[in-house]
Amino acid sequence: MNRTAPFVPTLLSALAALTAAYGTLVSPHSPGQEPAPAAVQAPQPASSLGAFSVSLTVKNLAASRAFYEKLGFVAFAGEQKQKWIVMRNGSCVIGLFQGMFDKNILTFNPGWSQDTKVLASFEDVRALQKKLEEKGVKLTTRADEKGKGPASFTCDDPDGNQILVDQHVD
């Protein structure tokens, strides 16, 4: 007895519905010929908060550094003597901070690419602050609106996670 028989009409109905909704599911290229890869366009945000990293509060910087090195992270900035370092694994960036914060922080750096290169153009931290306040985001600290160059502001998400938007460039 063939148990797949009832499944086939259902599958064909689903394919017909998808074809009606999204167009043909048959590839337009010749058999045996691979189609050219289509460019995948990710949706672009209205504004960018900049490079992203997670700032972790740690109890023992040396032990934490050794642990993250085992995961493939490499230190590229900071001062162990000052009790902070920044580490990278591919495009993932973490900061390890001993005795500087009460809890972990999601950090964004306007003006920097993910590999900490200065961007030719970016949205200033004060403009980002204004946009977020206009959307009803309550800030816990604010950048001076009349200032220029490096500045920062913070807010908390609905679950109490702290977010720091910290611009280091002019």
Image (tube, helix red, strand yellow):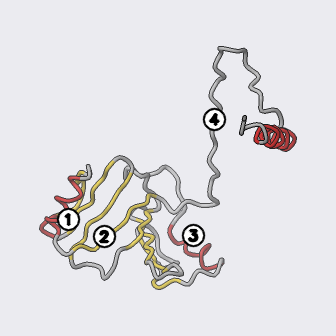
**Residue identifier under label 1:** 64
Q: Nearer the viewer, residue 140 or 117?
A: 140
Residue density around tag 1, few if under 14, some if 14–19, many if 20 or more, within 10 Å: some
Instruction: Kindly report the distance in space between the C-alpha atoms of the residues bearing marks 4 and 1.
Output: 40 Å
**Residue identifier under label 2:** 56
Instruction: Kindly report the distance in space between the C-alpha atoms of the residues bearing marks 3 and 2.
Output: 27 Å
Q: Which mark is residue 39?
A: 4
Q: Horizontal and vertical percent for residue 19?
A: 83, 38
- The answer to the question of whether label 3 and label 1 lie on touching residues, with beta carbons closer than 8 A, is no
Name the kind of residue labelled 1 in the image: Ser
- The answer to the question of whether label 3 and label 2 lie on touching residues, with beta carbons closer than 8 A, is no
> Tag 1 or tag 4, which sits nearer the N-term?
4
- The answer to the question of whether label 4 and label 1 lie on touching residues, with beta carbons closer than 8 A, is no
> Tag 2 or tag 3, which sits nearer the N-term?
2
SS for tag 4?
loop
- 156 with respect to 92 (left or right): right
Residue 24 vs 35, above or below: the answer is: below
- The answer to the question of whether label 1 and label 2 lie on touching residues, with beta carbons closer than 8 A, is yes
SS for tag 1?
helix
Q: Horizontal and vertical percent for residue 6?
A: 79, 41
